[in-house]
Amino acid sequence: MTHDLVIANGTVVSPEQGTFDADVAADGDAIAAVATPGALSGEREIDASGKHVLPGAIDPHTHHGIYRGLEADAETESRSGLVGGVTTIGNYFRRPDSYREIMDEYVAAAEDNYYHDYFFSLGLLSYDHIEEIPYIVDELGITSFKWYMNYKYVAPEKFGVDCEMRDDWGDAFIQALAEQDVPTTLGHHSENVEITSARGDNPYLDVETDEDGEHRDYDALVEQFPGYAEAQSMTASGSLARQHGYDDNFYAVHISSGQTADELAMLHDAGWEITGETCTHYLALTTEECDERHNVNPPVRSKEDQETLWERVADGTISCIGTDHCANLAEDKIGDDVPDSLPGFPSTATMLPLVLSAGVHEDRISLERAVEVTSTDTAKAFDLYPKKGSIRTGTDADLTIVDLDEPKTVTPELLQSAADYSPYEGREVTGWPTHTIVRGEVAYEDGEVVGERGRGTHIDRPITAD
């Protein structure tokens, strides 16, 4: 039998089955066979000798459309994702309007422009949004949501909604999700705003209180957003979820501090089932390396925090790695000082290479663990598994062929994002994809995006058995 595509003679890395030499075949969108090397033939064959074949990477935490509009970001940022072996992204998307009324427009913009697959996670901002949850789940196929603790008290002024997003609202949010007939996921931005707002300008309102005119460096962010304020918020909201039997669906996004990671480990030991995510900038950067380009909330922290996060990735406390990716231009990003600069930066294309370089090559985690936290565990957390995050017959043929020994110096040109800078610019990173395959189609090959714009599609959830 001749298959549409065969990846021959590669070393397959599967968290479920281990690491082994094999051919992988695809017919149409799906994996058709996994067999001993040399056993399969295809209309197109890619020789992966000396390389590793991984499930396509999944970036669960992006913000496409936040600065440039969704149509523009869907095109350029999915192209960029292919460079880094990403075959699916989760886009956190928030608007004050009725999602029932606006999502058709945004889905259309997405479907016409994505090179790879994607799923929406909707930020809810009002009681009206909570009432729409059954429609969002049943009609839109969206089962993941976000609770922005950083917008507590300021949502009316920032978004024009009649809701301050206090804990009574959060309680109603969790209960509504727990009542759904299908699995859902609640992403949680952990931040005690009573603490952070008291320590400096409220970054979520256009208010400047810096009166002395002194330049504020990166330490100003770290001082305003202490790790303990993140840890306390995660624990408090996670406890509320636990009261409603929902802690196994509670997903703590962008854990930045060692305190929070250690707190999560303690909660796991006590039987809590919260899922933890960290981001590559917390694993690859430290405060001392950061400047105006690296403004992000929560901020990048110390070397000690970084090493604790790696330890918690290794021991399973932190299950997923994302990027918090935003596409913006340097002229818009860079302000008068660090707090004055726009929050967020581009990162999706560097996610997998940084985990391979700083994690696997520096002996912090195994290669199989790298695949788990960049693909398989993420697919499970967002109810995409086994359609995504797996190399087995019948699943989507999302594959990344990686040369573990390939060094590249990070430049904007390499990453092919709309952003004209990178927070990792000039850094040598070892371990890069040579090919990215999206549902059986070669979409990136030897430095060139060769896939079809608009072929990416929304992953409706729940995933059906077939």
Image (tube, rainbow, N blue to C red):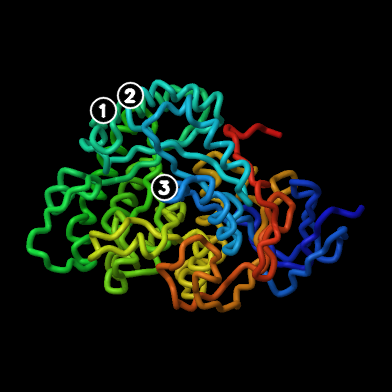
Residue 364 appears at what percent x and percent y?
45, 69
Residue at image position (27%, 38%) is: 158
CA gap, disc 2 and disc 3 = 23 Å
Answer yes or no: do the residues labelled 2 and 1 have beta carbons within 8 Å?
yes
The amino acid type found where label 2 is placed reads Tyr
- Which residue is nearer to you in this view: 305 or 125? 125
Q: Pointer 3: what residue?
A: 66
Q: Secondary structure at mark 1?
A: loop
Which of the two discs, 3 and 1, sits closer to the camera?
Answer: 3
Query: Can the viewer see residue 52 in this picture?
Result: no
- Pointer 2 local density, CA inside 10 Å: few below 14, some 14–19, many at least 20: some
Q: Counting residues from the N terminus, which is met first, the one under dot 3 or under dot 1?
A: 3
Labels 2 and 3 touching (C-beta < 8 A): no
Identify whether 48 is placed above or below 165: below
Q: Secondary structure at mark 3?
A: loop
Give the residue number, with chain letter if any, for mark 1: 163
Location of mark 2 (residue): 127
> Label 1: few (<14), some or many (≥20) within 10 Å?
some
In the displayed orientation, state which residue is furthest to the front: 331
Q: Earlier in the sequence, mark 2 or mark 3?
A: 3
Q: Residue at horizontal 62%, vertical 67%?
A: 433
Mark-to-mark CA distance, 3 and 1? 22 Å
Q: Is residue 402 left or right of residue 246?
A: right
**Observer able to see residue 360:** yes
Identify the mark nearer the N-term, 2 or 1: 2
| Mark 3 residue crowding within 10 angstroms, few (<14) / some (14–19) / many (20+) | some
Disc 2 on helix, strand or loop? helix
Residue 57 in the image, given as x and y percentages of width and height: 57, 56
